[in-house]
Image (cartoon, rainbow, N blue to C red):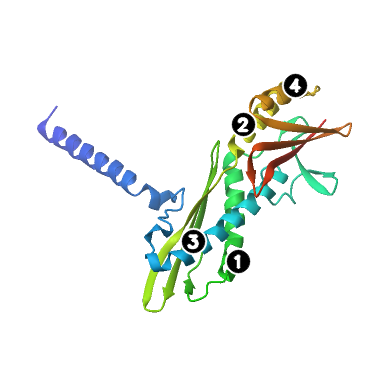
Amino acid sequence: MKRGQITVFIVLGIIIVAVIGLLFAYKDALIGSEAAQVEGIGTLQPELMEAGELIEDCVLEVAKVGLSDLGMHAGIIDNSQLETFDFSGLDATYVYFNQESKLPSREAMEESLALFVKQNVRECLAVELPGFEVIPAEVNEVSVDIGSEEVDVAVEWPIIIKKAAIESKVDGFKISVPVRLGVIYNEVESFLSQQLETPEEVCLSCLLDSAQEKDLSIEVNNFISTYVFVVQDQKILINDQPYHFVFANGY
């Protein structure tokens, strides 16, 4: 091989390595960041912390309302475009229908809750903050992470808080709701996997026995061609109430 050819290959190798390095360095800018980058109210000056905490408490309540709606609709808050069953006035969402699983992915559930929080969190501007002035920007991003023991929510929402001559800016809010949604989701997902293997049968013990091991209670409602399941988590409460996850199976 000639010296000139070797030089060309070396130059090409350097260019390829450089391009790969740039892709890694700027991957968030190219494909978008998966999570809101928020430091939270810890950056506020002590004199402004009271206002920050009150707004943060409100953000927590908004997230709790969204989580409750998420559970009552089997993982998707707005289930108006999905197959549902009238369960005592509740539109119970089918997660098994026509021998197919309709269970939303964990990512879809996170996106549904994030959208709810983003659409409703500005209600927290109505919180009474005597002595404080609040100057909010737009809500940029909301990210949700559903874990086994808690659900984490980060709201990228720049707000300037003033009190007399003191002024500080918070970049957003980070809250955690102690709810075992990840555990519940895994149980339902496992139950549906077994259901798909025997589409003509309803293996109640497949769900009941496993759920009991996780300290979950299951209410089974039989409407002949439809079963409605209500999963209750008595172990961790939200506003002193057990968490509910309701879903329907059609046969």
Ranked by sequence position, the earlier of labels 2 and 1 is: 1
The quadrant in which the C terminus is found is top right
Foreground disc of the pair 2, 1: 1
Q: Position of residue 116 (x, y in %)?
A: 62, 55
Element class at badge 4: helix
Q: Position of residue 80 (x, y in %)?
A: 75, 51
Residue drawn at point x = 28 percent, y = 43 percent: 21
- The residue beneath circle 4 is 205
In the image: residue 49, left or right of residue 69: left
- The residue beneath circle 1 is 123
Foreground disc of the pair 4, 3: 3
Q: Which residue extends farthest right?
A: 224
In the image: residue 118, left or right of residue 100: left
Residue 39 visible in the displayed image? yes
Q: Position of residue 128 (x, y in %)?
A: 57, 71
Q: Are marks 1 and 4 in contact (CB under 8 Å)?
A: no
Spatial distance from mark 2 to mark 4, Cα to Cα? 16 Å
